[in-house]
Amino acid sequence: MAERLAALGIDVHSVGRTRLFRTPDAFVVGSDQTLEMKAPEAPTFNAFRRAVRTARQQSPRLVLFIDELAVSEDQAVLWLRRSLGRYGGGYLEILVVGNGFGILWP
């Protein structure tokens, strides 16, 4: 997924995994900002919400890749609002990368 961010002009360095505790997926190069990246496997609200819920334990910044799913921009906005209503505490930024669109929150 780091390659997909690089294609968008966001340079990141992947972080190694550990079994001891949850870690973010990457650091933004040239900063101390961490990112968690998720790609829900199904075009459903539950899969989207699960990604928002689980990522918050790893980084206050989330990138959600839904560009390979049949999800419209309007649907993604609705799902993001509904997910943030319940699981939004602690996030500084969320980027949703869709097929032909992007949503940056806040």
Image (cartoon, rainbow, N blue to C red):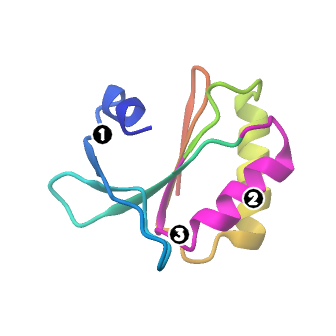
For the point 23% across and 67% down, the residue is 32
Real-space Cα separation, disc 3 to disc 2, in angstroms: 15 Å
* Residue at the top extreme, as displayed: 100
The kind of secondary structure element at disc 1 is: loop
The kind of secondary structure element at disc 3 is: loop
Q: Which residue is mark 2?
A: 50
Q: Which residue is mark 3?
A: 91
For the point 73% across and 38% down, the residue is 41
What amino acid type should be assigned to the residue bearing mark 2?
Arg
Q: Which residue is mark 1?
A: 10
Magenta segment, which residues? 41-63
Picture disc at residue 76: none
What amino acid type should be assigned to the residue bearing mark 1?
Ile
> Does the magenta-highlighted stretch encompass residue 51?
yes
Left or right of 1 in this view: 79: right
- Establish if 73 lies above or below 37: above
* Residue at the front extreme, as displayed: 19
Specify few, some or many for label 1: CA neighbours under 10 Å numbering under 14, 14-19, or 20 or more: few
The answer to which of 93 and 5 lies nearer the viewer is: 5
For the point 76% across and 56% down, the residue is 49
Q: Which label's residue is closer to the chain start, 3 or 2?
A: 2
